[in-house]
Amino acid sequence: MAEEKVKKTKAAEKTVKKAPATDAKVKTVKKASAAAPKATAVKTAPELPEVVLKSVKFLDDRKAENIVILDLRDVANISDYFVVATAANVPHLKSLSDGLQRLFKNEQYEGYRAAGTGDSGWIIADYYGVMVHVFSAEMRSLYDLEKLWKDAKRVELPAA
């Protein structure tokens, strides 16, 4: 029986001796895999849907101020993108609202919805996962969508 215990002990020692070698290999692999993403990591802007690009261009051409694009895909399920802009005054807000509706109709964006009026200080045009919000300056600071959705990524405005 003593011989059996000695054999089991020697077998256990061999197993224990092999374990550190395996750990060393794992550490080497981890170091190599940790270095790989750094070499290939490239930060790229997401490809924006056509409706976002056309809405931003329209708003910029019509002198809307402080245009921001928020990417909500990782933080919300109500929309993929918010486009937020400020109108200079009530007539400007009404004009931007009418123009966005005309743009969506001319581009044949079937199924878009619009809400709000220039007098309310906030209009929304919604088209399949993209919400375009245009505010008066007072309403934008009151609702502060950028702060409300602070976890959303800000998307760089496309170059003109």
Image (spheres, rainbow, N blue to C red):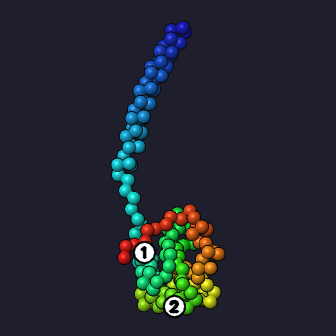
Q: Nearer the viewer, residue 1 or 156?
A: 156
Query: Mark 2 sits on what residue?
Result: 95
- Tell me the amino acid under the disc marked 1: Pro
- The correct choice, above or below, for 46 with respect to 128 in the image is above
> How dense is the environment of label 1, judged by Cα within 10 Å: few (below 14), some, or many (20 and up)?
few
Quadrant position of the C terminus in the picture:
bottom left
Q: Quadrant of the N terminus?
A: top right
Residue at the limit of the structure toward the front, as seen here:
88
At x 49%, y 82%, the residue is: 64
* Residue at 45% from the left image edge and 86% from the top image edge: 62
Residue 28 vertical placement versus 84 (above, below): above
Task: Please tell me in which quadrant of the rendered image residue 21 appears.
Answer: top left
Q: Give neighbour class at mark 2: few <14, some 14-19, many 20+ (Cα, 10 Å).
A: some
The numbered disc on residue 101 is none
> Is any atom of residue 83 visible in this view?
no
In the image, 150 versus 109, the foreground residue is 150
Q: List x then y, in percent, for residue 14.
A: 44, 19
Q: Are marks 2 and 1 in contact (CB under 8 Å)?
A: no
Q: Residue at x 44, y 26 (%)?
A: 20
Q: Residue at x 48, y 90 (%)?
A: 99
The circle drawn on residue 49 is: 1
**Amino acid at pointer 2:** Ser
Instruction: List x then y, in percent, for residue 18.
Output: 43, 24
Task: Point out residue 47 in the picture as x, y percentages from the top left corner.
Answer: 40, 69
Helix, strand or loop for disc 2: helix
Q: CA distance from mark 2 to mark 1?
A: 24 Å
